[in-house]
Amino acid sequence: MSSSSPSRIENLCIDRGLKLTEQRRTIARVLSEADDHPDVDQVYRRATRLDSRISIATVYRTVRLLEEANILEKHDFGDGRARYEEVQDDHHDHLIDVKSGKVIEFFNKEIEALKKRIAHELGYELIDHRLELFAKPISSPDEDGAA
Amino acid sequence: MSSSSPSRIENLCIDRGLKLTEQRRTIARVLSEADDHPDVDQVYRRATRLDSRISIATVYRTVRLLEEANILEKHDFGDGRARYEEVQDDHHDHLIDVKSGKVIEFFNKEIEALKKRIAHELGYELIDHRLELFAKPISSPDEDGAA
DNA sequence: TTATGTGCAAAGAGTTTGCCAGCTA
DNA sequence: TAGCTGGCAAACTCTTTGCACATAA
């Protein structure tokens, strides 16, 4: 059983010649539908909800596979576990809301240009970069969000 | 035994009323003298060279203590272990040489201002931020560095 | 059919912690 | 002296892996 149209990530797997098992299809679907930056455990939980025959080991193996196939991007927001999101055409950075844990994506042309220029000035060619802003909502009453 | 003048970090510990044991003194000295961004294991090795009566657990406990006392800054350069450096007056960012693993510090006023502005535009107040550039030396013959 | 993928549980890396002896203030 | 600190080893979290069985192509 596996009806409904293939997810974006499923299609990318087909393009790259990856063998598509039921488990991979399910994980691909979960990741295609995610609009956040889930960690492995979250992907695992969402996937087992759709198909209980999936082990956490398979999730780890699959996200690594997808990362190596340049389908997924791995992030580290400093909380000790890896987070994943689908690779996008446009580069963006992240602002982490320290109250709620929410992650907001943003893009800023000036910053992108500056990064490249700074690397050059130091005698380097920029390969990759990472910019994360940790911030709290302006004028938020001091509620307690997740850790 | 413990002569020679107190290291910068030792003095900060005294300021903050932290109990100074021989182990902490040694670890403080190692960290004050470091001009790189050592991980716990490196601190441990440098410390035991000066005094073999130090365990890795103490190093972990001490760097955490110093971090909480705002004496040390903890970094994560994406290699899976925490790196430490003394807190500095001026903020700076890091460029990681992916060939050699060397970490270069830099400061750029424009980037600092932009970070703050971007957070504001998104409705946030910047608390902390992290910018890391991963780069390779320009015109480096393609030798093989660390993975 | 056959190379590959999967589940399970054990192993690894980095980090934390409980307990009692030892040392600092 | 009183109470905090340190050593040791066990425990924890996240991630990887060996092995035997299952499955896609």
Image: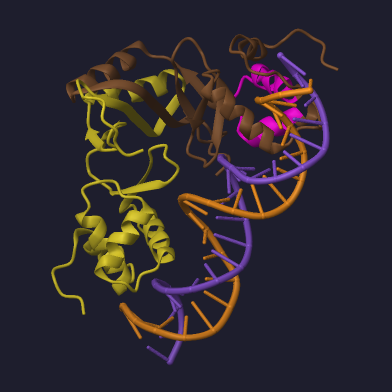
Chain colours: A yellow, B brown, C purple, D orange
Q: Return the x and y of residue D12 as percentages of the image width and height.
A: 53, 51
Identify which residue, B93 or D10, lies in the foreground: D10
**Image vertical order of residue C11 relative to residue D23, above or below:** above
Secondary structure character of the magenta stretch overall: helix
Q: Is residue A69 visible?
A: no
| First to last magenta residue range | B23-47
Q: With C8 as the anchor, is A54 left or right in this view?
A: left
Q: Residue at x 37, y 57 (%)?
A: A63
Q: Return the x and y of residue A110 as percentages of the image width and height.
A: 24, 21
Question: Is residue A97 inside the magenta stretch?
Answer: no
Question: Is residue B42 inside the magenta stretch?
Answer: yes
Q: How many marks?
A: 0
Q: Residue at x 36, y 38 (%)?
A: A147
Farthest left residue?
Answer: A4
**Image vertical order of residue B99 relative to residue A133, above or below:** below
Q: For residue B45, which quarter of the picture?
A: top right
Identify which residue, A65 or A2, lies in the foreground: A2
Q: With B68 as the anchor, is A77 left or right in this view?
A: left
Q: For residue A135, which quarter of the picture?
A: top left
Where is the N terminus of chain B found, in terms of image quarters? top right
Q: Residue at x 62, y 13 (%)?
A: B17
Q: Is residue A49 visible?
A: yes
